[in-house]
Amino acid sequence: MPIEIKMPALSPTMEEGTLAKWLVKEGDTVRSGDIMAEIETDKATMEFEAVDEGTIAKIAVPEGTDGVKVGAVIALLAEDGEDAGSVSGESTPQPAAKESEAHPSPKDPNKTGSEARPAPEDDRDHGKPADAQVAKDEPKPGTAAPAQNDGDRVKASPLARRIAADKGLDLSQLTGSGPNGRIVKADVEQAKPGAAPAPKAEASQPAPTAGGSAPAPAAAPQIPDVPHETTKLSNMRKTIARRLTESKQQVPHIYLTVDVRLDKLLSLRGDLNTSLSARGVKLSVNDLMIKALAAALIQVPKCNVMFTPNELVSFKRADISVAVSTPEGLITPVITEADTASLSSISTRMKDLAARARDKKLKPEEFTGGTASISNMGMFGIKQFEAVINPPQGMILAIGAGEKRAWVMEDGSLGVATIMSATGSFDHRAIDGADGAELMQTFKQLVENPLGMLA
């Protein structure tokens, strides 16, 4: 039997993907670990490796195909000793058949998978007399029911299908008298030839409501009559839109802002970069912000949490998801154990993750699982903003630009200092306002006295 190669789930949020490129062709021999295709998920373009060995007998989904559901058969693999030519001529298993295996009929509630198979059909060669097979297809009194569709697949016996094809009948127009509305031989023989097929547009219309009218479809946005171009949404952009909409609709956000003086941190950064230059490490302000947030979460553990419907999860370490902008959208690679990691380690890892994020080469474990997030738009001159929480995390910190402002110094005199505004967005179901305020106060103290985060 040929091996079905199915669309894999290459990220935790992946429901469908784009088969970007096949790296093999029909007739090629593959071994376990060979790269067969490049698949675009909702987060990255990833390589798909072979698990089994054999010959590519059939490519069922051509490269460039969008919206391929996870679990859909994309190719068939002939095993050693199997004729690839004969396999390639077989039809790809239909989704409807898979659906019927996964969901057994009410008559056989205890059967699933390979056990829930239909009884032998009347047109199969089992050595039975023709009269016996006709009798098997005769309807029982009171069992007539409309033909049932399984998606676009009408339930009918193979013999009934063959007779219908010979007579030019459309099975979707017939009423089945077999079990569960199945169309059998007698139904087809009694039907008149030339039955017109039902218009597909009518079949796809939603059923009328109790009031007799079908629900109106959602109206598409009206595009202004202005010269424009359209770009198809990528899987990443669709996922971003869905998750951020869910976040704003389902997570009650509370926003807390503090102004932070950066002068000591900038001075420390300069000294550290001088010391690290021989190792080729150059710290960014963002590296120090990641460290400060991680340290603050450990000092205020009530904010290092995740809300679930039945539990409040408190984390023992701080893994920081860092927002990185790519040509297709935002992705958040994770700096694990940022609370105990050195600044040089954070800097080196962040540069590597950001580069591979823009090339869509991140692995799923590198952009999932953080305990809190940070988003820095200071490099764009943005003074202050409110970021959307990245579910299921409990908070995200938005970092603005450092700028020269009038400031009251420690001795009470008025001077000029480099000031940055930072805004925390908190899930108010899990984090009270006072706890969020304590985290922001701790973050401010660590940035203004940066040696404390290194101790």
Image (cartoon, rainbow, N blue to C red):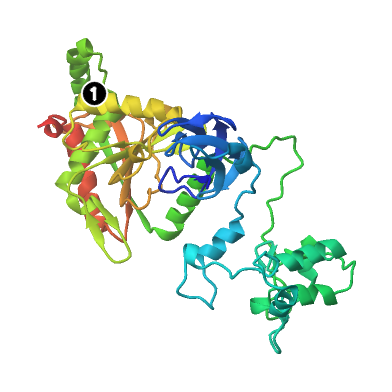
Q: Is residue 86 left or right of residue 251?
A: right
* x and y percentages locating residue 390 in the rendered image: 38, 48
User: In the image shown, does 447 or 106 lie closer to the viewer?
Assistant: 106
Q: Quadrant of residue 369?
A: top left
Q: Residue furthest top?
A: 278
- Left or right, 78 with reference to 268: right
Residue 446: x %, y % from top left: 17, 36
Give the image quarter of residue 340.
Answer: top left
- Asked if residue 418 can be seen in this view, the reply is no
The image position of residue 155, as x and y in percent, is 68, 68
Crowd class of label 1 (few under 14; some 14 to 19; many from 20; radius 10 Å): some
Instruction: Point out the residue furthest to the left here.
Output: 455
Q: Residue at the location (45% across, 46% down)?
A: 9
Residue 86, x across and y down, in percent? 63, 41
- Regarding mark 1 in the picture, which secondary structure is present there? helix
How many callouts does the rendering have? 1
Which residue matches tag 1?
A: 266
Snapshot quadrant of residue 18: top right
